[in-house]
Structures are given as C-alpha cells and as structure tokens.
Amino acid sequence: MIMSAYFDYLSGSPLDPRVLEAMMPFLKGVYGNSLSSHALGREAAKALKVSREKVAAFIGASPDEIIFTSGEVESNNLAVKGLLMVHENGQLLASAVEPLSILRPVEALEKWGFSASLIPVDANGQVRLSALEKLINRYTKLASVSWVVAETGIVQPIEAIADLVKESTSVPLHCDASLAARLFPVNVRDLNVDALTISSEILGGPSSVGALYLRDGLRIQPLLEGSPQEMGRRSGRENLAGIVGFAHSTELTISERQSRFNKLKQLDGYLKARLKEIPDLIINADLPSRTPGILSCRIEGLESEALLTHFDQAGIYASSGSPCASMIGKPSHVLKAMGFADQQASSSLNFSLSWETKISEIDEMIDTLSQSVIQLKTMTF
Amino acid sequence: MLYSPQYMRHFQTPANIGDLEEADAVEDVHYTGQGCFDRIRIFAKVDDGKIGKVTYRVRGCSGTIAACSAMSELAVGLPLEQAVQIQGEDVATELGGVPDRKRHSVDLAAEALRTIALKLTK
C-alpha cells in the first residue's frame, strides 16, 4: 500500500535531509570514541562538545547541564527515577495526563516504597493548580508535569505550575518539553524548572536521541552505570551521529520555528474546519491554548479502530487511544483523566501534523473518513 | 500484512448487515471483558430446523465487524443443534485466522450465534 496521507507525526517523524547531511560524516568516517586520547577520539569529543553547546543554547542551559539520552522515554525515566532514588523515601507528584514514560516509573517507585500522587486535571486536561497546591508537602521530592499533552495538544500553564511549586518549597520540578520545544521557545531559567526533557525526532532530527537538562547542583542517581560518559550520569557510548543530528535539528528549529508555527496553525485551522463537516464529530479539549498540529476528536458510537482500519486500507495513517488498536488494551489514560467514559475514549482519533503536511492529504483523509462514518453508522444500533 | 485477505474482505464489504423483518428471534450480546465495548444485535430466521438467514447490527472494531460477517455466512444451513456449538475458532477459521488482539471479536460473534440458536431451540 502506498501512503497517501500521514497524520501520525508524534509517533514518528521523518528525518530532515539537512540534518542527515550534517550526520553523514559521523555515520561514515568518524567512528572514534570520545573517551580516546588519539586524533579520531579527539575529533569525536570535539563534535560531542559542540553538539552539547548547541543543545544547551536551544533551551538556555549550560553545556554541563545536558545529559544526552536515547530519547524522551529514557530522559523521563532518568528524571523521575534518578531524582527520587537519591532519597531514602519521599513523595512524587505527577500530572494525571503525563506520558506513560513518566507514569510507569512512578508506579515502579511506588513498588520500591516511595509514595506518589497524581495531580488531577480539569475536563480540558489542564492541571488543577489548587489540587497541586494541596498535594505538595514537606515529603514531596519531585513534581513532574509535561508542557504539552501529547494526545490532545493541550498546553499546561507550566510557568504558573513552576511558580506554585517554587513559591513555598524547594521541590525540584521536571517538565517534559519534547512536544513544546518544536513550537515554543524554551528557556529553563525563565521557566524555573530543574529538569527538562527534550527529544530530537519531533524537531526533524534522528529518532532515539534526546537529552535531559539537569540544573547544576541537582543530584541524580544514574540508571546506567559503568563508564564515565555524560559525567557519570549516563554511562554508555554516545550515539555521536544521532547527537550531531539532534544538535543540528535544534539550530534549524530556532531559525524556522516561527514559520513552522504559522504553517501548522494554518493547517490546523483547515483540518479542524474540515473535520467539523463530519456529522456528530466532536473535537476533544478544543481550547484556544491547544497546540496547533495536535488534535484529538471523537465520533461517539463508532469504534476508532474500525475507522483507522479503513484509513490504513486507503494509505492514510493516524492513531488513536482505542483499546482495540492498542497493544496495551486499555482506554487512553489521558482522556479518562479528563473525565471521558471508556466508550468515549474508544471512539477517539488522534491527528498530528507537520509543517510539511499538505492540504491535499487532509482532503483525502476527510473523504475517506466521511465514507467510513457513513458505512459504520449503517451497521450500528 | 496484519490481517488476512478474508478478514479485510469481510470488514470492508460485510455481508448480511441490517434488520431482518421476518426474524424468528432477536438477541443482543456484548463483550464483558476489560477495555472493549463491542456489541452485536443478531437476527435469525429458521427453516426446517436449520438457520435460514442471519443478519446483524454491530458496534465494534474491525475484528468484530469482520467476525459478524463471517459468522452470518457460516451460520446459514446449520442445524440449530450445531449452531449452539459454534466456537470463536470456527469463525476465526472463516477469517483465515485472527491475531490475538482480535480473539475477543470472533468469540463475541460466536457467542451471538450460540445465544440466538439456543433461544430458537426452546
């Protein structure tokens, strides 16, 4: 099947050809180990240093505050587990709409004797600040809130959350900014966060590369130990070509972010208008603060997996939190935290766009969706 | 490919959808397992102790739609005492096999046929 339309950019994004070009020398000839003292090793170490400086500049951090990782999942695991495990015990707070790369480590920490509370969200998926205020206490050792909710595109009031956390406590705040960084300028000092996750792929960089910003002086327990890379905070040979590509993608993002934002906003408006032509379709959490290019919607009474199977046959790729489509087999925890019933969650489709998305792709998807909805509605009761 | 050609044929062009005005029985079944809300309304007509025609309405995923279609074709001509014995595996065979995550679909379609056949034998 030839792909005709792609709306799953949060699951996987193509590599920018300019990034690939920057990576090529490190995929071909520069194979030295950055720890080696010979010339090839020094060349690798230099590339690593330059890349670290670029990634640090991207988020307003110092180079030594950057820990390169294998991507968002590892960065989130390192933040949550690593910042808790330097303590004997304590409480962890995480929003109820965090990605599973936050929530699963939270569950693991609970099994290891730490306590955890999920910060409730309102019907739009935004953190309830009053609830956060009540949950923080002297045993709290970390709070973690993602800037943008992946499933709905809802933007969390991260500055207000940071102000609240920092107002009366010294609790470190971690923020997963993987999605936010593609559209919003990120400055860790202005945000007043202590740890921050960013990821390469969503910026047009290679997959399986990311970084964790860790404020200078904050102690962390490494997840991987055994060699001195990343100043002992993350052992293992660096993915040098990937890191070089990641760094280049951050430079491109800085120079093109505004034009990408404008393009995504235009595409998002068109997608939303066309989706509204579908009878009974409801946009989930349709707030002005929704990030353009990430949209969740539902057609109650229809199973999204059936729609996605029709899409797949037509070469149209999107995603859902539907249990039948999910290997996990549970309705979306994000939609459930927002108060959705299981059946509503199982009716939800997710569309994520790129600035490269074409209007013709949206038109083709809408045509297929219209036909599929008509067919499925004739079957239901 | 994730699904067999038979599965995709039954899903994309399902057979025997709709109400059956001359039905001798109508039954509703729904999946009771975790995280799935598929449900089927099945209609059946009996001719000389055998299933004469089966139609259905369905709210569900691609697997349950395909399984209902396959079941509705499989059922025709079956004596009622055989219809009450239908298992999910029989429906899966008609679909050329199903992945594990669609096992609930064939089981639910088979349950729909067993339920209405049992009612018709009473």
Image: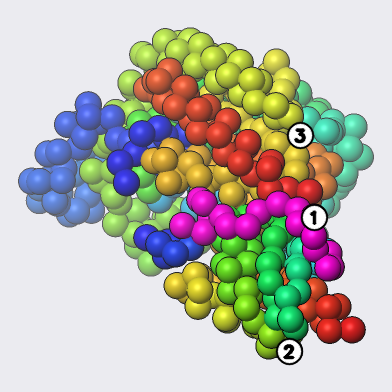
Chain identity of mark 2: B
Task: Confirm whether residue A176 shows in the render.
Answer: no
Measure the C-alpha gap from mark 1 to mark 2: 24 Å
Measure the C-alpha gap from mark 2 to mark 3: 53 Å
Tell me whether the residue at label 2 lies in contact with that at label 3, contact meaning CB atoms closer than 8 angstroms: no
Chain identity of mark 1: B
Callout in the foreground (1, 2): 1
Category of crowding for the residue at label 1, using alpha-carbon neighbours closer than 10 angstroms: few (below 14), some (14–19), many (at least 20): few
Callout in the foreground (2, 3): 2
User: Tag 2's secondary structure?
Assistant: helix
Give x and y (percent) for residue A122.
84, 33
**Segment tinted magenta in the rendering:** B8-27
Give x and y (percent) for residue A253.
39, 21
Task: Confirm whether residue B81 shows in the render.
Answer: yes
Image quadrant where residue A244 sits: top left
Residue B81 is marked as: 2
State the residue position of label 1.
B21
State the residue position of label 3.
A125
Kindly identify the amino acid type of the residue bearing the numbered disc 2: Glu
User: Tag 3's secondary structure?
Assistant: loop
Say whether residue A325 is left or right of residue A2.
right
Chain identity of mark 3: A
